[in-house]
Image (tube, helix red, strand yellow):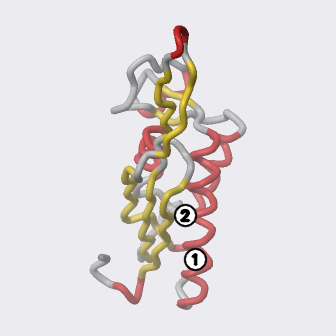
Amino acid sequence: DPENPTKSCKSRGSNLRVHFKNTRETAQAIKGMHIRKANKYLRDVIVKHQCVPFRRYNGGVGRCAQAKQFGWTQGRWPKKSAEFLLHMLKNAESNAELKGLDVDSLVIEHIQVNKAPKMRRRTYRAHGRINPYMSSPCHIEMILTEKETIVP
């Protein structure tokens, strides 16, 4: 919970059908950002103008030049994750307006992505075998807080 609940707002989503690993990397990229900057960044990711640096779940992730600005080499453009996080930012912004907070001074103080129970499907293999075909949904929560001196 935030240290000053009157100056902050929350947003959360459960069992979202979007890849956990991609969403975790995207969330880490926008952590601590100003809300306007985060909005612009996520929209840039969707149109591939800026990449998301993949720092933890980066096995087999290709290198891209756009990752250099984060001091990293590997990056991708997880479109669906960016869209889901944009929706959540919009929701948090609405919550802030309802509470009467100053929307232009909001900063993403806390953002957390957790694994949700896996969804199970099956794929059919040679010689009559069946293998699982799992998806990895996630829970997302974020807390936005008003900061006094902001340089967006």
CB atoms at circles 2 and 1 under 8 Å apart?
Answer: yes
Indicate the quadrant where residue 125 lies. Answer: top right
Indicate the quadrant where residue 56 lies. Answer: top left
**Could you tell me how far apart the alpha carbons at marks 2 and 1 are, in whole angstroms?**
8 Å
Report crowding for label 1: few under 14, some 14 to 19, many 20 or more residues within 10 A (C-alpha): some
- Residue in the image at 46% along x and 57% along y: 33
Can you say whether 90 is above or below 111 in the image?
Answer: below
- Residue in the image at 46% along x and 75% along y: 10
Q: Percent from the top left, x then y, of residue 104?
A: 58, 73
Can you say whether 119 is above or below 54 in the image?
Answer: below
Task: Say which quadrant the N terminus sits in.
Answer: bottom left
- From the viewer's perspective, tell me whether residue 117 is left or right of residue 129: left
Give the mark, 2 or 1, whose residue is nearer the N terminus: 2
Q: Please, what is the three-letter code of the amino acid marked with disc 1?
A: Val
Report crowding for label 2: few under 14, some 14 to 19, many 20 or more residues within 10 A (C-alpha): many
Can you say whether 137 is above or below 66 in the image?
Answer: below
Q: Percent from the top left, x then y, of residue 126?
A: 55, 9
Q: Percent from the top left, x then y, of residue 106?
A: 50, 71
Residue at numbered disc 1:
103
- Residue in the image at 50% along x and 61% along y: 34
What is the secondary structure assignment of the residue under circle 1?
helix
- Residue in the image at 49% along x and 58% along y: 15
Q: Which mark is residue 48?
A: none
What is the secondary structure assignment of the residue under circle 2?
helix
Residue at numbered disc 2:
35
